[in-house]
Image (tube, rainbow, N blue to C red):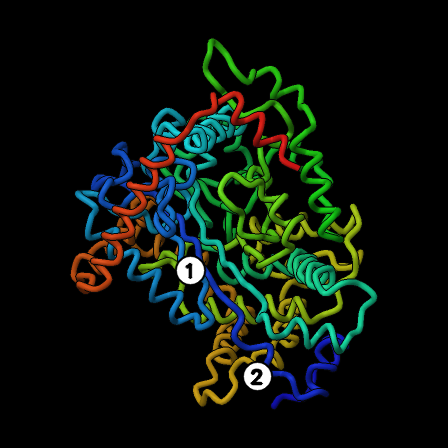
Amino acid sequence: MTHLNNKLSTRFDQILANGQQRLLCGGSKGIEKESLRISKDGFIAQTPHPKALGSALTHPYITTDYSEALIELITPPFTDIKDTLAFLHNTHQFVYDHLDNEMLLAASMPCGIDGDESIPIAQYGSSNIGRMKHVYRHGLWHRYGKTMQAIAGIHFNYSVPEALWPALYELEKPDVSPEQFKADAYFALIRNFQRQGWLILYLFGASPAICKSFFKSRPALMAGFDEFDPGTLYHPYATSLRMSDIGYKSKNQANLQIDYNSLSGYVSSLGKAIATPYPEYEKIGTVVNGQYRQLNSNILQIENEFYSTIRPKQVAESGEKPTLALKRRGVRYVEMRSLDLDVFNPIGIDEGKARFIEALLLTCLLKDSPLISEQDHRINNANQLAVAQFGRKPGLELDRREKKIPLREWAAEILADMQPVCDILDGDDASKPYSQALKQQQKIVDDPDLTASARILKHMVHQQQHFGCFSLNKSAEHEQYFRQRKLDGYNTDQFNELAEQSLAKQREIEGRDQLPFDEFLKQYFAQS
C-alpha cells in the first residue's frame, strides 16, 4: 500500500495504526439527476409530467424539480456505486419507455426556452403539501425568475460507513456524545469540501457556453460574455457557468452568514434566515387577490431555497422541516450539488467520476478541517467563481490561506492526498478502480484540453454548431441509445407498480386533507 501521505490528519494515521482501514469502505452512494424534458424540435416540453411515470408528489424515485418539464430521477443509496448507476440507468430506461415524442436534454444549461413564460411551474395536485411545493416554486419565480430554475445538475449523496463511527469515536475519545462527534465530523468534511470543491468544477464542469435565449427575460446578465456565434455566449476558459454567478445567486443570499462550524450553528443560522423579513420580497406580497405568490416574504421561504455546493442532510418525515430533522436526528449524509450533467454519457455520470467523488469526500472527512471564518467563506466563494468562469486559463491562481497558489499545483496536492484513500478503497480489486479514476483526473489536471468543458467547445468549433444544436444532437444520441433498448420485464413491473402506488398515495393524501391551506402553512412553520 502507498506510504502514508503526511498531509493527511491524525485521524487517518490512527485508523491505519489500528489496522481498521477496511472500515473506510462501503459508504452509501445515491444520485439525484435532473433533466429538462424537451420536444423533438428542441423546445422545453409544455406537456404535464407523464402519468405513466407516477405521481411527482409521492414517487420515491421519479419526480420533478422546479418546472413541470424538469424531471428528477433519484436512486436509493447503495454501497456499491455500480448498483447506484445500474438503478439510475434502469430509471432512465423506464422513463424513455414512456416518453412520447420527447427526450431528455443532455446539457445542464437549458436550451429551447423562450423567456420565463415558456417554463411551466411544477404541479403537485390539490393537497396542502402539494400546494406548498407549487407555491414555493411560484416564490422562486418572483424572486429570481424562472429561467434560473430550469438549470439541471446532479446531486451526489454520500454517507460515511456506519461501522466507521464507533471505531473513530473510540480512537479519538472526544469529550462529546457519539451523536455530536458524528455531526462535528460531517461538518468538518463539509468545510474541507468548501475549500477544495472548486476541483469538481475544473474536472467535471460541462457548461462553458449558454444559449442566448437563456437571457431573454434578464438581458442585463449577458454583460461580460463573449459571443461564440450569433446564438451562443461563452467564456473562453469557462468550466461550469451553471455554478457561476448567473446560476442560483442573489444579493441577499450572498450576504447570508450560514454557520458551517457546527450542526447547532447551521440549524440556527438557516432558521434565522427563514424567519427574517426581506423588504424586497415584502413588495412582492405573499397573498395577492386571494392567490399565494410565495410562502412568505422572508430572506428564505424554506431551507431548500438556500443554494450551497454541499449540504448536511437527514431524511425528513412527511411534513417535517429539514432543519428540524437535522436537529432531532443529526446528519445522515452529505449532498454534493456542484456536478454538471456529463453530456457525453447517456445517464449524465460514469463510474470513474463517481468513484473519484467518493474518494474526495472521504479524504475531506479524514483531513484536519479548521473552522471557517467570514473571510474564509468569501475566499471559498471567490475561488469557486474563478474556476467556474476561467478554470482552464493558463496560469490561473487561487487564494489559499491568503496566499496565491496556481490551480494546477493545488489540484495536484489534493490528488496526492487522495491516493492513500484510493488504495484502501481499491482493497483486493486487481483493477484498482479508485486509483485508476484518480489517475484519469491527474491527466486532466495536467492537460486542460481533456476537461469536459474544453471538449464541448472543441466539438462546437469542429462541427460549427451553436450550443443549442450541440446539446440537441447529444440529447438525440442518448435518446437513440435508450430507444434501442427495452427494460426487462421484472424491472418494468417494479416501476409500474411504484407508479400505481404513488398515484394511489397522492389520492389518499388529497382525500384526508382537513386543514385550510393558511392553517397548514402556519403549523408547518411553527414546528420547533
In the picture provided, is 1 more to the left or to the right than 242? right
Q: Residue at x 57, y 83 (%)?
A: 423
Asked which quadrant contains residue 31, the reply is bottom left
Asked which quadrant contains residue 490, the reply is bottom left
Q: Which residue is drawn at 64% across and 71% down?
A: 363
Q: Residue lying at the far right in this picture: please name it.
A: 175
Residue 448 coordinates in the image, percent (x, y): 51, 64
Q: Which of 132 and 42 is in front in this view?
A: 132
Image quadrant in which the C terminus is located: top right
Image quadrant in which the N terminus is located: bottom right
Amino acid type, mark 1:
Pro
Secondary-structure class at tag 2:
helix
Which residue corresponds to mark 2?
Answer: 423
In the picture provided, is 401 more to the left or to the right than 18? right
Label 1: few (<14), some (14–19) or many (≥20) C-alpha neighbours in 10 Å: some
Which residue corresponds to mark 1?
Answer: 76
Q: Can residue 442 be seen in this view?
A: yes
Secondary-structure class at tag 1:
loop
Q: Which of 321 and 440 is in front in this view?
A: 321
Q: Label 1 to label 2, Cα distance in Å?
A: 26 Å
Residue 63 coordinates in the image, percent (x, y): 36, 44
Is 416 above or below relative to 453?
below
